[in-house]
Amino acid sequence: MRAALLIQRWYRQYVARLEMRRRCTWNIFQSIEYAGEQDQIKLYNFFGYLMDHFTPASSERNLISHIFRENNICRNVDWERYFCYKSIEVPKLYSGPHLSFPITCSNAAELVEAFKNKQQLHSRYVLQLLGETWRLLRILPNISQISTCHSKEITICGDLHGHLEDLLLVFYKNGLPSSEKPYVFNGDFVDRGKDSLEILLILFSFLLVYPNDVHLNRGNHEDHIVNLRYGFTKEVLGKYRLHGKKILKLLQKIFSWLPLATVIDNKVLVLHGGISDTTDLHLISRVDRHKYVSALRPPKRKRQNRSGITDSDLEDDDPTTKPVDSSRRRVHSLTHSSSTGTRHEVQRRSLQGLNNRVTCSVEEELKERRRQAGLSQSYGDLRNSLANSDSDPDSGELLESYGDEWKQIVDMLWSDPMPQDGCVPNEVRGGGCYWGPDVTEEVLRRHNLTLLIRSHECKQEGYEFCHNRRVLTIFSASNYYEVGSNRGYQANRATRALTLRQSVGRTERSALRALREKLFAHKSELISSFQEYDPENTGLISLGHWACAMEAVLRLGLPWRVLRTQLVGDTLDGMLDYHLWFRELAITEPNTEVSLLETMYKHHSNLETIFRIIDTDNSGLISFEEFRQTWKLLSSHLQTEISDEAISDLAVSIDFNKDGSIDINEFMEAFRLIEKILGHIDYSYRPLSIGDHNNIMT
């Protein structure tokens, strides 16, 4: 009996230790993921600020203006001509799938089989399939209404994120979509995975065959601005170099026409992100959803002026040429400017808002932005030009945003549930809100619903109930962060062969690798923060101060005291020699020679996003001058002064083939070289100890 009790106690401790490691690893992955989303929203908000306040003649504005033109070239009357596929010949040597239109169920099944065998659909068929999809989506309502009276059950699929294996496994287990097997696909079909386009083509083909039984909801990644950062833009251009630009433009239009939600049997609401305390399904059902080409920025509306321009002219207007009140974007979240509490108080305490300069006046911030962007026009001249904008016969007297509508859509795409009552800004992602059980009860009661099904958040078991089982999260992409990180539909064979200990260990190593990369990118700031706790310059700080400094710099909301055993080695009487610690991590101390390189590595995601924005012809090349403008935009965004000489020297060093331009491969190779210059990162790890279990942040 005593032996059995000892074994049970040991086993409970063993399982508790694995669970603690698993939760800590999960916090690392999720915090880094959400920090990246917040960075993308920050960057886009900054670009929006430039578009709203800088004159059309400014070079910086011209570089980014095209991403704010919401398919103005794609007016319906010109649609067929611009995206015409008939002139594209399918060569006789083409061995991929052939489609006939109207598309049939056998065509859709053949497409599934072809993509399973790694075949590629010809660009003619891609454009034709997307064009047919756009025509169908235009007649669908914002909220689809479906019933189980015929099929008895409906399969709901969460985020796929380009994981084709998971979609194929869903079809293998549940059958292909049909009238007898209806499906709801709940957004985030693209980004991060390598087969996003194939997933879209499969879903669109079944949608065309079974428009009453296949339903697609829009996710927050069905957005061309988000795609610039998370891989879908790169994927399409890599697979279809000749016609990739047209395919992306057509998909940009299609994304804006995707329905926003689905209601099953008038009782179950299915949407991608979530709700807020202001969610009104009646309002959502009436909005012109196609106006929101990117949910990160509301469209603009003109009142009638001398030229007779009215609100009905909105679709053909370029929304980038006039100023708009910027106060809305000077908040923590895209749509939530104030609240009675913050996420800092309720769960993830460290991730702060989008901008700490809330106390600055608009005038002061505009002056500072212009100074740092190196623009010559004075603020007074700018203000006068804005004030006199109505003298232009083609301009409106006033631009308004669809404030309520936009907020509703952003909440639906970006929000997450929280265990506490209330509704607070989603400061972690930077868009939407966190809503509590009381909000769930109220919204469901108001619309006579019983259950809310959403996706948007990776869950380790593939699903999770919350809010008294009134909210169900479904996430269908398995191995999202790392092999073994989450179940999803468990498509990877290697994952099923791993034991629990192997799975946790593998995922933990990957999470620590990502975290150490964060340390690597912020080493100068970390040293400065450590020195604030070391006024006598002894080189020693307490572990408590180490944890405070780590959070103050990285802002990831992680349990640093728990992670200490994995990141910090031996200490002397509880004091950490941070110089020795950096040497153990192989992170060198900052110096002037590598400061620009360090900045480049630290913000490489933002730089790559700007690179792809500036590369308007999608050639993969930008000139030295465009590279300089890229850095000027980033330095203005970061409020960091970088000299033209330093940027020019960097451009020359990156131009490995010396052809006078920089291609994306040279650009990405530079990041790998910088890592070697600044120091090699030691990715070894130490398992968490059992004694740390009580400190875990749930």
Image: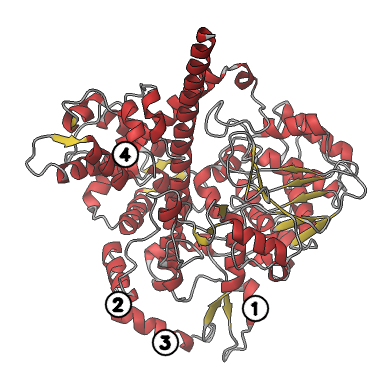
The residue positioned farthest toward the left in the image shown: 536
Q: Secondary structure at mark 1?
A: helix
- Label 3 belongs to which residue? 388
- Camera-side residue of 333 and 289: 333
> In the picture provided, is 481 more to the left or to the right than 374?
right
The outermost residue toward the bottom is 306
Please, what secondary structure does the residue beneath circle 2 have?
Answer: helix
Occupied quadrant, residue 190? top right
Q: Rate crowding at label 1 as few (under 14), some (14 to 19) or many (20 or more) other CA atoms within 10 Å.
A: few
Q: Give me the residue at 34% from left, 26% from top.
A: 566
Which residue lies at the image location 37% right of the left edge and 49% below the top edge?
350
For the residues carrying marks 4 and 1, which lies nearer the camera in this image?
4
Q: CA distance from mark 4 to mark 3?
A: 45 Å
| Residue type for callout 4 | Ala
Q: Does the residue at mark 2 contact the one at mark 4 (Cβ under 8 Å)?
A: no
Q: CA distance from mark 3 to mark 1?
A: 22 Å
Q: Nearer the viewer, residue 319 or 347?
A: 347
In which quadrant is the N terminus drawn? top right
Q: Is residue 100 visible?
A: yes
Instruction: Provide residue 284's location: percent of width, then percent of height.
Output: 69, 67
Q: Amino acid at mark 1?
A: Asp
Q: Report how many numbered discs are placed on residues in the image.
A: 4
SS at circle 3? loop
Upstream in the sequence, badge 4 or badge 3? 3
- The tag on residue 313 is 1
Q: Which mark is residue 379?
A: 2
Q: Tell me the element at label 4.
A: helix
Determine contact: label 3, label 1, CB under 8 Å: no
User: Label 2 amino acid?
Assistant: Tyr
Disc nearer the start of the sequence (3/1): 1
